[in-house]
Image (spheres, rainbow, N blue to C red):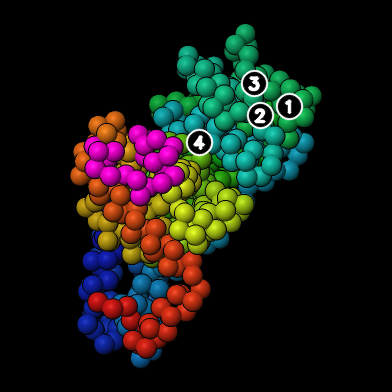
Amino acid sequence: MFDNLSDKFDRAFKVLKGHGQITEINVAETLKEVRRALLDADVNFKTAKDFTTRVKEKALGENVLTTISPGQLMTKIVHDELKDLMGGENVELSFQGNPGVILMSGLQGSGKTTFSGKLANYLKTKKDKKPLLVACDVYRPAAIDQLHVVGDQIGVEVYSNRDITNPVEIAQKGIQHARSNGFNVVIVDTAGRLAVDEQMMDEIEKVKRAIQPTETLFVVDSMTGQDAVNTAKTFDERIDFDGVVLTKLDGDTRGGAALSIKTVVNKPIKFIGTGEKMEAIDIFYPERMADRILGMGDVVSLVERAQENFDEEEAKKLHKKIQKNKFDFDDFLSQIKQIKKMGNMKDLMGMVPGMRKAMKGVEVDDDSFTPIEAIINSMTPKERANPEILKTSRRQRIAKGSGTSIQDVNKLMKQFEDMRKMMKLMSNKKNMANMMRQMKGMGGKMPS
């Protein structure tokens, strides 16, 4: 996410490396690179110019403390400005009304229908709501079918009426259906077009006037950069939407839409889509996004995702098994499944501070665990429960059954044994205390 932008910011801050103080000259050199990074990310020219002007004023007005380097200070100032540029604070979705009505708008191909499903799944699983999806795209032949497929996938009902061609009437009947059947949130998926046109704008204006939604969200493909911002401005002038949804942030996103849209339309980004799975939806936090852009990771979001997939009873059982050195391949497979539920691997890696740089050039995707799962699934229940019985002949059979090599199986066995030893060591409070004392004796440094 925003890898190119992050790399360019890194290069910009290197200008200050080794300098003992901030001066007009080195600030100017740094900000020249910052402005170039923003423009390369397809940020609006005026937005980039205003951004660097504010950073310059703050940087030259600061006295650098002896404990803070000029590079650290500049990073802090840029971080705060990035946070403000993207809205400052996150803005919650409103659920007022009985039912609350959320109107989805945007161009065709922006991911609007898929995101409607993600939002319904989020409201159902995280907010304990009973959502209803309403299919109002009467133009695209497969649009209604697509929404029904999404609804079936997440276990959410979809209201549609193929006999009616008026989107306003379908939306109204969908809301009536929700009231009659105990749904407390209605998500209305409207038609998109390949480009903004008058007919499209008239139609969505009529739908909005007729149903008076609690929230109107504008869904935009984040990979379209400045075009997305211009489209958002046109939509906002006509329907006065309440918030923005950025989709496809897991792709080759330059960052222009995320950094410019709040300034141009003065509406908050409320959600982001970070993958194809129905769970790949996050609330947008400007500060956390600024952290990630500057390579600081996003530990808070990582912990939140872990907690959402955390089974307390299962964890207690696992801890007892680790203490007895009984952690086996069934437990390992269970942990892999929990990690996969947290989201796509590249996104998770980006949340760990420093990991983006460490993993640069290394391809990490959701298929990374596939060979490991294949090897474990090729074991018998007895072998998974008793890894020590996996001698050469068994390993050869497992390699053949999993479509991997004996070297792959041996490598996994070594990694598993190393991990089991470390888990056993860390589960013992006495061992942990000794490790802490040793580290303290070395001045808090790990041995090289």
Q: Position of residue 36 (x, y in %)?
A: 25, 60
Kind of residue sitting beneath label 1 = Ala
Q: How many residues crowd around disc 4 within 10 Å: few (fewer than 14), some, or many (20 or more)?
A: many
Considering every residue shown, the one lying at the far bottom of the view is: 66
Within-10-Å neighbours for mark 1: few <14, some 14–19, many 20+: many
Dot 2 and dot 4 residues touching (CB under 8 Å): no
| Identity, as a three-letter code, of the amino acid under mark 4 | Met
Describe residue 435's horizontal placement relative to residue 126 as left or right. Answer: left
Q: Viewer-nearest of labels 2 and 4?
A: 4
Q: Residue at x 27, y 66 (%)?
A: 10
What is the C-alpha distance between the residues marked 1 and 2?
Answer: 7 Å
The quadrant in which residue 354 appears is: bottom left
Q: Is residue 86 visible?
A: no
Report helix, strand or loop for mark 2.
strand
Q: Earlier in the sequence, mark 3 or mark 2?
A: 2
Q: Which residue is mark 4?
A: 278
Asked whether the residues under the numbered discs 3 and 2 touch, taking CB atoms below 8 Å apart as contact, a structural biologist would say: yes
Q: Which residues are magenta?
A: 376-396
Between 8 and 398, the residue placed more toward the observer is 398
